[in-house]
Image: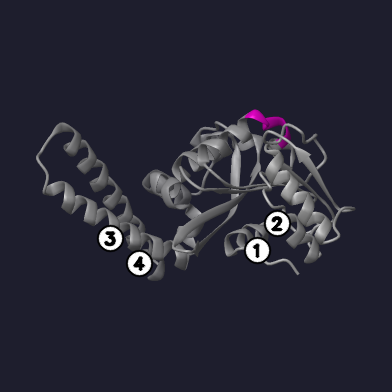
């Protein structure tokens, strides 16, 4: 049996059973092999833009006897993936800007599948805002801590009716209206599902973030007041404000106030 990291195992856990998987940026090909061994997917296409990682994936696929079930393709994002070839797309382990680029460049294919599992390594706010404004609906979120690093991830699908609708068209409930107006930036920063589920790893991250930001604020306070320092201090204070709101949201949920 193949052994994979907690990050990859958690991302794999978001992939629906029985889905034909396209693993973008597959690197070693571990996730498709793992899911095949689990009997959770019927087949997969392991894709990477670089020949080196693809060769490693091919070697591992042969080692585990998966050649009949897992194809490999040299591909820039989903460029080599045809519509209808996959039900699920995994994009994990790359920067948020690149995740957005792949979704935009391969919009036809990405919007045609029943789900996408995304694990951006950076720019979470930007990715979540892009999804929200581009018609992608978040179905589930997870978060794991491994080797001292935090990894949020999400499962989404494209829903044309969700794109660029006014609040009146969307007809949210009164509770949703209140939450969205009050906490939209908070959801972009930390993830609505993670907040609503009081996810323990997110809570741990919030405590860590507060400590780090307070330390930065203290350091900045001891420096000569310049325009640049003032701007950075304002940024840190805003982050601390959002962090406090997120922690208060946990408390409110705990006491049934939201």
Q: How far apart are marks 3 and 1 (CA)?
A: 31 Å
The spot of residue 121 in percent (x, y) is: 51, 48
Q: Which callout, 2 or 4, points to the residue nearer the camera?
A: 2
Q: Distance between the residues labelled 3 and 2?
A: 34 Å
| First along the sequence among labels 2 and 4 | 2
Q: Name the residue under label 2.
A: 31
Q: Mark 1 points at which residue?
A: 4
Question: Tag 2, which secondary structure?
Answer: helix
| First along the sequence among labels 3 and 2 | 2
| First along the sequence among labels 4 and 3 | 3
Q: Is residue 136 visible?
A: yes
> Residue shown at 73%/44% (left/top)?
54
| Chief SS of the magenta region | helix
Give yes or no for contact between labels 2 and 1 (Cβ–Cβ under 8 Å). yes
Tell me the number on the disc at residue 211.
3
Q: In this view, does 211 lie above or below 22?
A: below
Quick one: 237 or 136, which is closer to the camera? 237
Q: Disc count in the image?
A: 4
Q: Residues within 10 Å of mark 1 (few under 14, many from 20)?
A: few
Whether residue 152 is in magenta: the answer is: no
| First along the sequence among labels 1 and 4 | 1
| First along the sequence among labels 2 and 1 | 1
Quick one: 7 or 84, which is closer to the camera? 7
- Residue 258 is left or right of residue 35, and the answer is left
Q: How crowded is mark 2: few (under 14 residues within 10 Å), some or many (20 or more)?
A: many
Q: Mark 4 points at which residue?
A: 251
- Residue 110 is left or right of residue 63, and the answer is left
The spot of residue 22 in percent (x, y) is: 74, 46
Tell me the number on the disc at residue 130.
none
């Amino acid at each position: 049996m193949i052994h994979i990291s907690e990050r990859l195992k958690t991302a794999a856990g978001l992939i629906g059973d029985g889905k034909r998987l396209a693993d973008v940026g597959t690197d070693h090909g571990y996730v498709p092999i793992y899911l095949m061994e689990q009997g959770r997917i019927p087949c997969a296409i392991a894709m990477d833009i670089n020949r080196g990682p693809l060769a490693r994936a091919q070697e591992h696929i042969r080692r585990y006897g998966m050649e009949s079930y897992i194809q490999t393709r040299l591909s820039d994002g989903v460029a080599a993936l045809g519509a209808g070839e996959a039900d699920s797309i995994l994009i994990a382990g790359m920067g948020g800007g690149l995740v957005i680029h792949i979704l935009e460049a391969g919009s036809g294919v990405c919007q045609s599948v029943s789900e996408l599992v995304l694990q951006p390594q950076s720019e979470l706010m930007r990715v979540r805002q892009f999804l929200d404004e581009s018609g992608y609906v978040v179905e589930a979120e997870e978060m794991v801590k491994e080797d001292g690093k935090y990894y949020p991830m999400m499962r989404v699908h494209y829903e044309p009716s969700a794109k660029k609708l006014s609040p009146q068209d969307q007809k949210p409930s009164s509770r949703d209206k209140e939450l969205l107006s009050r906490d939209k930036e908070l959801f972009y920063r930390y993830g609505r599902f993670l907040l609503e589920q009081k996810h323990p790893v997110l809570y741990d991250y919030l405590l860590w973030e507060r400590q780090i930001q307070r330390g930065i604020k203290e350091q900045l306070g001891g420096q000569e007041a310049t325009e640049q320092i003032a701007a950075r201090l304002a940024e840190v204070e805003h982050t601390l404000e959002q962090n406090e709101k997120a922690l208060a949201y946990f408390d409110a949920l705990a006491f049934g106030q939201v």
